[in-house]
Image (cartoon, grey):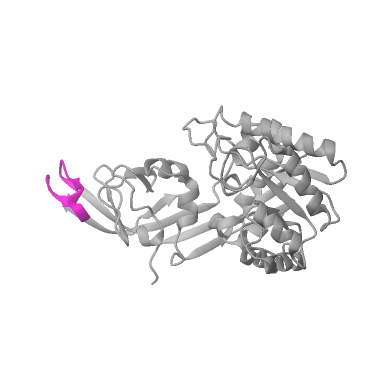
Amino acid sequence: MTRPILLTVRIDAMRHNVSVIRKSLGQSRIWAVAKANGYGQGIAQVVKGVADADGLAVLDLAEAHQARAAGWTKPILMLEGAFAAEDLAEMKALDASTVITSFEQAEMFKNASTVPNSLWIKLNTGMNRLGIPSRENHEALVGLVQDLSHRIQSPIHFMMHFACADLPTGWQSQFDEFQAAFAALKSRLTTQVGQASLANSAAVFGHPQTHADWARPGIALYGATPFEDESAEHSASGLGLKPVQSLTTQIIGIQALKPGDAVGYGARFRAMRPSRIGVIAAGYADGYPRCAPDGTPVWIAGRRVPIAGRVSMDLITVDLTDHPEVVVGSGVELWGEHLPIDDVARHCGTVGYELMTAVMPRVPRKIIDGQR
């Protein structure tokens, strides 16, 4: 018998989430962001789940190849652009659009023998990671577009990325900066400037004025919230999203402790009363965070129970003292339908994105599509 841990991916839930995002966006189109192997779901699963999106945004050429092999025929966007000139020829063969994120990439594009048919320029409006600076740089941007237009027959599109779209403030200055740069470009280069893409998942739900021509939702597609606050309206369920990913396993052992007995490495947890400690078949080698503190919830037999003791490579220990119905073989949900991944992430001082993408290859996968 195989070890009982299992990652379940629900394609029908992904499809539902696309429809929720579509309703929020109105006429704006959707780049479904599928980087990091579809946020851990697998590119082949994402291709099915986001079939109603307008395009697929990935990070590297391997993901683009996987998407085409899985039957994706709509546009593909390479979010970090080319890392070498030969990448551009491969993108054209894949009928994928590239993003230019620096003047160095722009120079590569101008000098390459073969380039894609569609081009986006990423502006740095204050995130200060990738992107060509836009503040007080409008003349340079005009010159850049003029130079690149000699290599491409279609208008050049523009995008940016928000740093604080999940917060009530901090996003407006970036939005205003993009709007100013984009307006300056359109006024000077009427036929050479195309469409705009600004909104990430948080902006899709929180800032409709940023929706523009294309939005780029990521985490919301997979049923987790892009917001870090704990309000009910900003929870995944409050946004109308369904969890795509569930990580489940079983209780494989139970220990009886006396007051003062310790559990696990470092003896972090000590029993204050006669206690029952359940042992779960999962650990950090499966992708569960080792940093999970005592009290982090797991779902067992209809209720939450707290982690008790340090997460080890293959095992997690939980306090079952107040849940006597649990026995060896009882099912455990580490996150999923009953226990939102965002709740687990908050206890661990991280975000659902990290947990979702960290599940290790040794964990078996089960794919469910309840609609088709």
Quarter that holds the N terminus: bottom left
Vertical side of 172 occupied by 315: above or below: below
- 260 magenta-colored: yes
> Residue, x 54% and y 31% (percent of image)?
167
Which residue is the extreme one toward the bottom? 1
- Does residue 365 appear in the picture of this structure? yes
Residue 62: horizontal and vertical position, in percent?
Answer: 62, 67
Q: Can you say which quadrant of the picture contains the C terminus?
A: bottom right
209 versus 348 height, above or below = above
On screen, residue 314 versus residue 92, left or right, reads left
Question: Is residue 194 part of the magenta span, yes or no?
Answer: no
Tell me the quarter of the picture where residue 38 sits.
Answer: bottom right
Residue reaching furthest to the right? 191
* Residue 265: percent from left, percent from top: 21, 55
Is 119 left or right of 191, judged from the image as shown?
left
- Which residue is the extreme one toward the top? 169
Q: How many marks?
A: 0
Image height of 243 relative to 1, above or below: above
Q: Residues in magenta?
A: 257-275
Q: Position of residue 169 (x, y in %)?
A: 56, 27
